[in-house]
Image (spheres, rainbow, N blue to C red):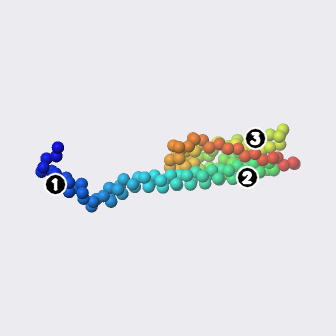
Amino acid sequence: MIPSILRKPLSSFLRAEAGSATVEFTLWVPVFVGIMLLGADASAAFTRQSNFWSVSYETARIVSRHALDAEAGAAFARNGMRIGSYAPEVAVTIDELTQTVTVLVTADFAKMAPFGILAFGMDNQLSFAVTQTLEPI
């Protein structure tokens, strides 16, 4: 039960709309900022993933043409995939039996996305392999 002395000021306060835009703005700003950061995170992560694919393909091509051995190829790929001080794990194998070169890349997804928002909803690691046929000498 509300005392009669407070009824009139309380009802006029509840009907007033002067500050409603400010309140709505402060409630929605974190949502919009979160959406913008999610977009920036996704954009950076997918750009870096595309770069990883390109460098992996280029490494497999160079090693398959006998320009680099497996160890030098792995170092070449790690250098090309470096993000600041972070470089993903790269393994280059040459299979003489099947005459193929395989470049296996394993990267920490949280280090690919600058804000780390995508790491909450996705797997922690990105892993893929690129295989190329060895060219005859």
Q: Are marks 3 and 1 in contact (CB under 8 Å)?
A: no
- Tell me residue 101's x, y (percent): 77, 44
Estimate how packed mark 1 is, as few (under 14), some (14 to 19) or many (20 or more) residues with alpha carbons within 10 Å.
few
Residue 79 visible in this rendered orientation of the protein: no
Q: Which residue is mark 3?
A: 93
The vertical placement of 123 against 52, above or below, is above
Q: Which residue is mark 1?
A: 8
Residue 45 visible in this rendered orientation of the protein: yes
Q: CA distance from mark 3 to mark 2?
A: 14 Å
Q: Amino acid at mark 3?
A: Thr
Name the residue furthest right.
137
**Residue in the image at 83% along x and 40% along y:** 98
Numbered disc 3: secondary structure:
strand
Q: Which residue is mark 2?
A: 58
Q: CA distance from mark 1 to mark 2?
A: 76 Å
**Residue in the image at 53% along x and 47% along y:** 118
Q: Amino acid at mark 2?
A: Glu
**Residue in the image at 45% along x and 52% along y:** 34
- Tell me residue 92's x, y (percent): 73, 42
Q: Amino acid at mark 1?
A: Lys
Count of labels in the image: 3
